[in-house]
Image (cartoon, grey):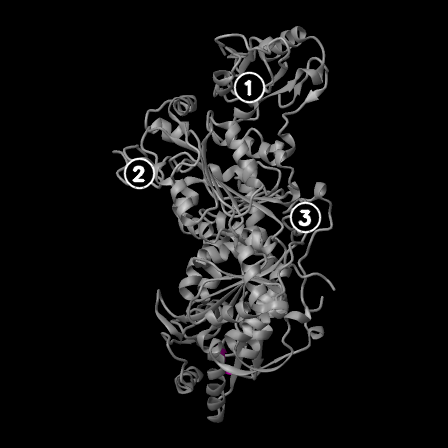
Amino acid sequence: MKADPAGVLTGSHYLDGDFACGEGAMAAGCRFVAGYPITPSTEVVERISRRFPMLGGTFIQMEDELASMAAVVGAAWTGSKTMTVTSGPGFSLMMENIGLAAMMETPCVVVNVQRGGPSTGLPTMVGQGDVMQARWGSHGDYEVIALSPQSPQEAFDLTIDAFNLAEIYRVPVMFLMDECVGHMTEKVVIPEAEAIEIEPRRLTEKSPESFDPYQVEEGQLPEFARAGDGYRFHTTGLTHDEHGYPEMSVECQEVNVSRLVGKIRDNAESIVRFEEEGVEDADVVVVSYGITARVARLAVEEARSQGLKVGFLRLVVIWPFPEKRIRELAGSVGAFVVPEINYGQIALEVERAAAGQAVTWPVHHAGGAVHSPDAITEIIVKAAV
Amino acid sequence: MTVSTNPTVGQEVEHPSAPLLRMERIPHVWCPSCGIGTVVKCYATALERSGVDLDKVSVVSGIGCSGRVAGYLKLDGFHTTHGRAIPFATGLKLGRPELLVTVISGDGDLVGIGGNHFIHAARRNLDLLVILINNFIYGMTGGQNAPTTPQGAKSSTMPFGNFETPFNLPHLAASSGASYVARWTCLHIRRLTWSIEEAIGKKGFRFIEAVAPCPTLYARLNKLGSGLDAMRFYHDTAEIRNGADTREVDVSFQSPIICGKFVDEERPTFLDLMHEHYSKQLGDRYVPMPPEGGMLHER
Amino acid sequence: MRYWRDPLDAGQIEAPGGDVHILADRCKGCAFCVEYCPRQVLEMSPTFNRKGYHPPEIVDIQACVNCGLCEMICPEFAIFCIELGDSGGNPAGVSALAGAEAGEVRP
């Protein structure tokens, strides 16, 4: 369906990434946000708290991130599109209820504007160190989707995609911005509401008597029922059967976990998204995401001007990781260079997917600033040897 | 047999609370002479008598023995993470304001790990009915010390007796801002049912502490007998003091339990305050979320 | 319950009668109903139910006034009563049958 014009601030704006993300959420139809202030994400909710009262949305600043995530999951069960916003320390706190959202198969969006870590780290300075945590942060087996914008414009566009993916796959979607993109101000063009496609909540059409919250047809996902519509359903964080009742058995666990993991893994090809350029005859491919991609482009251009055949691949969807594409490329390139503002996280995935066919050169940065293009070019040159 | 045959009329008669229970899951998991089942019966009865639209009632529980309550009631039920029943319920209520949201959970869940959420929800006077089943211990996990365990009582993590000062729950609720505060034991079935029914008809943060026996852990570890012995104890020592000062209703080991309705005030709820404030500040520009919630519909 | 004198309207008031139904297999033998029935209608039965608990049995159905306390206090949803006016019939007959039902011997 089309976006609700009330939430779409059509026009050309000069916005920072945080504000653009907030606008994206409102355009996507998000009408409930529970959050807790944490630098550098706070501007997202500040924007939302200012606009929501005019949109029929409710924003509540909860007492901590644990409560914020719990409220986001609760509100999602009323049929609303819901979101919370945080950074590293809050992301760690939210893991408990991200697990609950994954287990209950609740669509919602969690925005993490990453900063230097670990622990309190560098509150006002950039980091990309939460990438693995986005995938593995909560305990147990489950899969999530994670996106990474490289600009305020993408912070707007990809937030809408995040909400849509959450609805399609009934999964919490991690929106991994970083402090640079969040606090960078650029032109953001917001289209007409008519031009924005929104995935609606997939409500069941069954009657309450014949509805089971986790009954699935082959290859499909369970249908949703809203609290208050008379379905009298039950759902739990315990391993549950198709009725939503707790069931402690090996068989039930297998059914549950295989669906939670399978729904993303089996559909990975439809979900992965990346941008590539110049990889066809490349000797070295630079794999990057977020703000680092913008620096990496410069490094790639510099390396090319030195005569090297360098390709550029930017991850838009980080999880699920495009291992098929990396494996393909590994067959033809000699090396991957993976600059990230962390001590090697996606580099591990690249290395794994390359399966020994190409060498992976990580370009570490502990956090606090972006790479200098020279630091990346230097590694590209080494990798090309 | 789960259905009794009325010998006189010859028809099968089911328990009157059956329409509100998930009968396929009865008998429930709670121990013999545990008081949680009694609280559930009182809640179910109160709901029926109140006449509210049961389709709009949502029950949220946390983790623990009392946390299993949501799984036995035939209402929209949510068995959530430990301590987070109240914020989850907040999301439900604010996401669809017409819902009547009840939180039913235990002492460790609601004021231990959930303590922060408890006091803030009370402070905000969020429109939630919170029934805290207090058995003075963490039952499900094997009898550990709880924030409500009286001094001197033994538990699995305080094997020599608890030396910490416990919470006085009605006082905690009242001083945090709850607009309805009551405490009853599982013996006071009629007053508990009436209190729940009364609270269902009100708005704001309504807190009812239901003291329940825990025969398998609390009573056994402290050699207090069975649930029946606990009920006899409530019978012999509980005092009803409606309107008592909540500062004076703390519980010590095997001391008289002061029961009653302590606080009953009409105060604007979170949503009342929000609507009033935004209407004043923003006038016609304010678009409140409709009672049926903020779900996006096809236009 | 013992009175120190007969209530003045004892002649005009007719106490209701109750038909107690015990769902014996649900019972976990807590004895709350036996202890707190104000009319001593119930006793713990020496028989076992399928789970090995002793359910209550009716010993004096005539005394039941359908106060509903047993129904309210039972944590297991294993006992309830119906006012005799609804079911009609001979209270003595109900007592005999209900008593027999609850007293069935289970292996």
**Amino acid identity at mark 2:** Thr
Give the secondary structure at mark 1: loop
**Amino acid identity at mark 3:** Asp
Q: Using the rendered image of the protein, determine whether residue A4 is visible from the camera's viewpoint.
A: yes
Q: Please state, as top left, top right, bottom left or bottom right, where the N terminus of chain B lies in the image.
A: top right
The residue carrying mark 3 is A229
- Residue in the image at 72% along x and 73% along y: A194
Give the secondary structure at mark 2: loop
Q: Quick check: B139 above or below A5?
A: above
Question: Which portion, as a residue range, is magenta?
Answer: A283-287
Answer left or right for C4 relative to C68. Answer: left
Query: Mark 2 and mark 3 in contact (Cβ < 8 Å)?
Result: no
Residue C1 inside the magenta-drawn segment? no
Can you give x and y, in whole percent of width and height, for residue C42 in the image?
A: 53, 13
- The number of numbered badges drawn on the structure is 3
The residue carrying mark 1 is C50
- Residue in the image at 56% along x and 42% along y: A251
Marks 2/1: CA–CA distance: 36 Å
Give the secondary structure at mark 3: loop
Q: Chain of mark 3?
A: A
Secondary structure character of the magenta stretch overall: strand
**Amino acid identity at mark 1:** Arg
Query: Mark 1 and mark 2 in contact (Cβ < 8 Å)?
Result: no
Task: In this rendered view, identify the residue nearer to me: A117 or B273.
Answer: B273
Task: In this rendered view, identify the residue nearer to me: A203 or C3.
Answer: C3
Q: Using the rendered image of the protein, determine whether residue A316 is visible from the camera's viewpoint.
A: no
Label 2 crowding class (10 Å Cα cut-off): few <14, some 14-19, many 20+?
few
Label 1 crowding class (10 Å Cα cut-off): few <14, some 14-19, many 20+?
few
Discs 3 and 1 lie in a common subunit: no
Q: Between tags 2 and 1, which lies in front?
A: 2
Q: Between tags 3 and 1, which lies in front?
A: 3
Can you give x and y, in whole percent of width and height, for residue A78 in the image?
A: 62, 53
